[in-house]
Image (cartoon, helix red, strand yellow):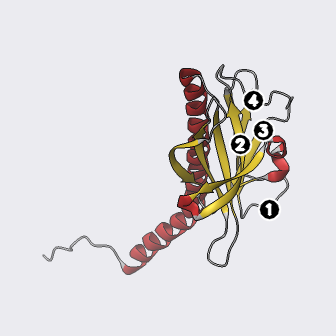
Amino acid sequence: MKSRQAAFTLVELLIVVAIIGLLLGLVTPAASNMQAGLQLNQNGQGIIDKLSLCRQLATTQNRDVELRFIDIPTSETDTGGQAFQIWLLNPRGGTAEAYGKIVRLPEEIKLNDDLSPMWTKLPSGTADFTALGGDRTYRAIRFRSNGRLARNDMGSDNYLTYSFRRDREAVPGNYYTLQINPVTGWVTTYRP
């Protein structure tokens, strides 16, 4: 008597391949959205960490400290964007000194001007950021030696919102909002 070997037929193999392809087609967009959300979260947390460090440096060194948000203009080879760096201010009015490296946000993440009322109230200036190729304009959040923000007249307009450049809706589907308490200097975050 001949024994029959167990094996898959061609039809069964094609069905399994089709199911795997269908599952991959359904999972890929969700995975890429999750990865984009994680990237936005990571960069927002990086800004919070720098703000916390500014507050800590201001109170421990008894001097004003700024987190400077540097504008990187758009050029032919660069889509522009934003970077940030901590600056220690001289208590006697001398020149400020950079503290740590410049951190550049990824090109696909941008400050959402329409959802960031705090942005227009921040003082601006120009400084030499050698790592970025010279003089750049910036806006700064300044912490006083008591841990408070230098500008506490913002009221409820103390928000900065970051989103993706590709998201052009009035309220983006994915965003990271920072609310900075002007009295305590603590940061609260909001995410969808």
- In the rendering, at what x and y percent does residue 19 appear? 49, 67
Instruction: State left or right for residue 62 relative to residue 3.
Output: right
- Badge 2: residue crowd in 10 Å (few <14, some 14–19, many ≥20): many
Where does label 4 land, which residue? 150
- Cβ atoms at labels 1 and 3 below 8 Å apart: no
Which numbered disc flags the more N-terminal residue, 2 or 3? 2
Residue 142 vertical placement versus 82 (above, below): above
Q: Is mark 4 on a helix, strand or loop?
A: loop
Amino acid type shown at disc 1: Arg
Residue 65 vertical placement versus 100 (above, below): above
Q: Is mark 2 on a helix, strand or loop?
A: strand
Q: Residue 168 carries which label?
A: 1
* CA gap, disc 3 and disc 4: 16 Å
* CA gap, disc 1 and disc 3: 19 Å
**Residue 87 shows up from this direction:** yes
Instruction: State left or right for residue 159 relative to residue 27.
Output: right
* CA gap, disc 1 and disc 4: 33 Å
* CA gap, disc 2 and disc 3: 14 Å
- In the rendering, at what x and y percent does residue 170 appear? 85, 55
Q: Is mark 3 on a helix, strand or loop?
A: strand
Residue at 53 percent of width and 59 percent of height: 131
Which numbered disc flags the more N-terminal residue, 4 or 2? 2
Nearest to the observer: residue 54 or residue 37 = 54
- Badge 4: residue crowd in 10 Å (few <14, some 14–19, many ≥20): some
* CA gap, disc 4 and disc 2: 10 Å
Q: Nearer the viewer, mark 3 or mark 4?
A: 4
- Badge 3: residue crowd in 10 Å (few <14, some 14–19, many ≥20): many
